[in-house]
Image (cartoon, rainbow, N blue to C red):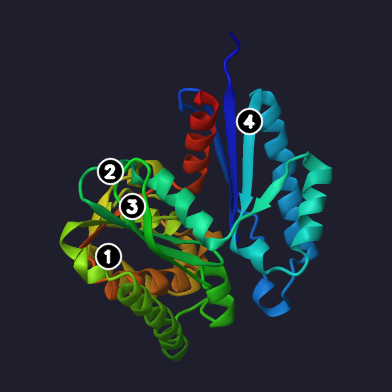
């Protein structure tokens, strides 16, 4: 019998991720491309021609990898930037014409659900409940759910700020106290609303906190002093609030040039990492977190798991 392979694509505001696995869920191929799709989106409301070209090039490359690995089942999702851009339909049509990959634009709830499905492997069974937050390029999802194999979402919000659009909207390529405080106030108010509406206090004694995206993985690499950003080694690391505070304070006192030279941040990420650090810090502070587990596994892993489960049924 020919072995079945599965592919998941997660098109975000800053990066596009591909994961190909076999029918046992074992990884065959994994790739991330910094498409910077949301670059300039906050001001113009549309994808720039340059951003669309980077996206097209990425999907052409992914099509080659999908064909090479004989993938039978595929699901490709797009998140915040495609929800916001006025010309996202045009872009999605171009992707189809270029690669014959059909992109599904999902809402914040589905994004949170898939992230949960993928990210819980490190904490499953360690508590009755879990809070997961995913800091993307164009939005940030915070979700309270049961910590089970098929988690039940109790409450979720999608905050319309991520690393890239917040960096542009609040002019935070380099740290500026006034602009940083405006972002903190916005994120803080939305997170406080989540805490209140989710009745988080009533679950507080039996909940794990998990964060997925490159920001917690970079901070974990920094805290563990790997010497370079290593997302695979950082996957599953539990970070204390004190260590996170120290790492983030170090980031906020750095110039963009210093961040570009930082082995945990690098040139491409240096333009958006101040905003990412502020959002990340504000959320865990308002959630009153003692420690957080960094997770490399996210929506793409959730997609693969569901494709395999569907076939088995």
The residue that mark 4 highlights is: 73
Q: N-terminal of the two: label 3 or label 4?
A: 4
Mark nearest the camera among 3 and 4 is 4
> Where is mark 3, residue-wise?
294
Distance CA(mark 1)–CA(mark 3): 11 Å
Front tag of 3 and 2:
2
Where's residue 63, x and y in %?
72, 35
| The N terminus, quarter of image | top right
Residue 189 shown left or right of residue 105 in the figure: left
- Residue 297 appears anywhere in the view: no
Sequence-earlier tag: 1 or 4:
4
Foreground tag (2 vs 1): 2
Mark 2 vs 4, N-terminal side: 4
Residue topped by disc 1: 244
**Furthest residue to the left?**
205
Label 2 sits on residue: 124
> Left or right of 147: which side holds 306?
right
> To which quarter of the image does residue 59 belong?
top right
Q: Is residue 149 above or below residue 217?
A: above
Crowd band around label 4 with a 10 angstrom C-alpha radius: few (<14), some (14–19), many (20+): some
For label 1, count other residues whose C-alpha is less than 10 Å away and answer few (under 14), some (14-19) or many (20+): many
In the image: residue 212, left or right of residue 43: left
């Amino acid at each position: 019998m020919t072995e079945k392979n599965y592919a998941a694509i997660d098109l975000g505001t800053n990066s596009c991720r591909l994961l190909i696995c076999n029918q046992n869920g074992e990884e065959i191929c994994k790739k991330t491309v910094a498409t910077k799709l949301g670059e300039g989106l906050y001001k113009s409301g549309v994808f720039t021609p340059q951003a669309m070209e980077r996206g097209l090039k990425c999907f052409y490359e992914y099509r080659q990898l999908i064909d090479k690995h004989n993938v039978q089942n595929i699901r490709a999702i797009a998140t915040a930037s495609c929800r916001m851009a006025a010309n996202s339909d045009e872009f999605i049509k171009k992707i189809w014409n270029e690669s014959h990959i059909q992109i599904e634009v999902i809402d914040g709830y589905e994004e949170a659900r898939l992230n949960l499905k993928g990210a819980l492997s490190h904490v499953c069974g360690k508590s009755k409940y879990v809070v997961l937050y995913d800091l993307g390029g164009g939005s940030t999802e915070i979700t309270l759910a049961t910590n089970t194999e098929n988690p039940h979402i109790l409450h979720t919000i999608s905050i319309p700020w991520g690393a890239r659009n917040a960096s542009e909207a609040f002019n935070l390529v380099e740290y500026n106290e006034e602009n940083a405080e405006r972002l903190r106030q916005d994120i803080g108010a939305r997170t406080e609303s989540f805490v209140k509406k989710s009745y988080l206090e009533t679950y507080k004694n039996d909940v794990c906190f998990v964060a997925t995206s490159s920001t917690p993985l970079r901070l974990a690499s920094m805290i563990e002093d790997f010497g370079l950003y290593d997302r695979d080694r950082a996957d599953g690391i539990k970070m204390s609030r004190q260590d996170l505070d120290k790492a983030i304070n170090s980031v906020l006192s750095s110039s963009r040039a210093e961040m570009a030279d930082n082995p945990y941040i690098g040139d491409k990420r240096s333009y958006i990492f101040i905003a990412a650090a502020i959002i990340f810090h504000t959320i865990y502070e308002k959630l009153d977190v003692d420690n957080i587990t960094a997770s490399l596994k996210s929506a793409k892993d959730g997609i693969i798991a569901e494709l395999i489960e569907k076939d088995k049924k």
